[in-house]
Amino acid sequence: VGEARDGLEAVQRVIELRPSLVITDLNMPRMNGIEALREIKAILPNTRIVVLTAQNTEEHIFACLQAGADGYVLKDADSSELLLAIESALKGQRFLSPAVAERVVQSYLNGGHHGSLGTSWNTLTRRERETLKLIAEGYKNREIGSLLSISPKTVEKHRENLMKKLD
């Protein structure tokens, strides 16, 4: 377990400690969280990184996802949401807070131009689109499974596919 006061120190501590998981904010002195995330992923690509931040802008969300974030959780979220993000990241899955997922969906619906989101939408299956809609509405895996008559494990797989397809 380690702690850092700023982005540069965070990168140094990760190199030194080689953790399996990093939880980081975006607003840090000397090196911001997105730059630190890129550095960490370049040095230790298997280290999972969950961003815990108050930033809910499209620019921050997409920059973190493109830099390799495994999770994006808002600071005002319940602790259970952070725990779910950590568990998902450690399983090799990505996690977005429901409010963040809503932002991603709205960006797409409004013709957002972030990465390949628009063209990737066409690769989603009907079931993946249904799952994404329910995620954006704030439903948890178990609830989504119940609504779609599928297992929570299948929902997890759909989430994983969505994160890959939507980059």
Image: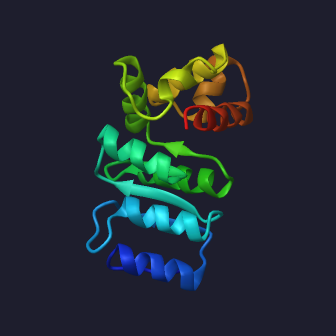
Q: Total of numbered circles in the picture?
A: 0
> Which residue is at the front of the view, 27 or 63?
63
The outermost residue toward the bottom is 16
> Residue at the location (32% across, 70% down)?
31
> Which residue is at the front of the view, 8 or 87?
8
The outermost residue toward the top is 126
Residue 42 visible in the picture: yes
Look at the picture and state if 130 lies above or below 107: above
> Which residue is at the front of the view, 157 or 43?
43
> Which residue is at the front of the view, 43 or 78?
43
Residue 39, position as x, y percentages in the image: 48, 67
Residue 80 visible in the picture: no
| Quarter occupied by the C terminus | top right
> Residue at the location (40% across, 29% down)?
102
Image quadrant where residue 141 sits: top right
Image quadrant where residue 114 sits: top left
57 displayed left or right of 70: left
Look at the picture and state if 129 lies above or below 70: above
113 displayed left or right of 127: left
> Residue at the location (36% across, 25% down)?
112
Colour mapping used in the image: rainbow
Residue 70, position as x, y percentages in the image: 55, 52
Look at the picture and state if 34 lies above or below 120: below
Image quadrant where residue 147 sits: top right
Residue 105, position as x, y percentages in the image: 43, 25
Residue 21, position as x, y percentages in the image: 57, 66
> Residue at the location (41% across, 31% down)?
104
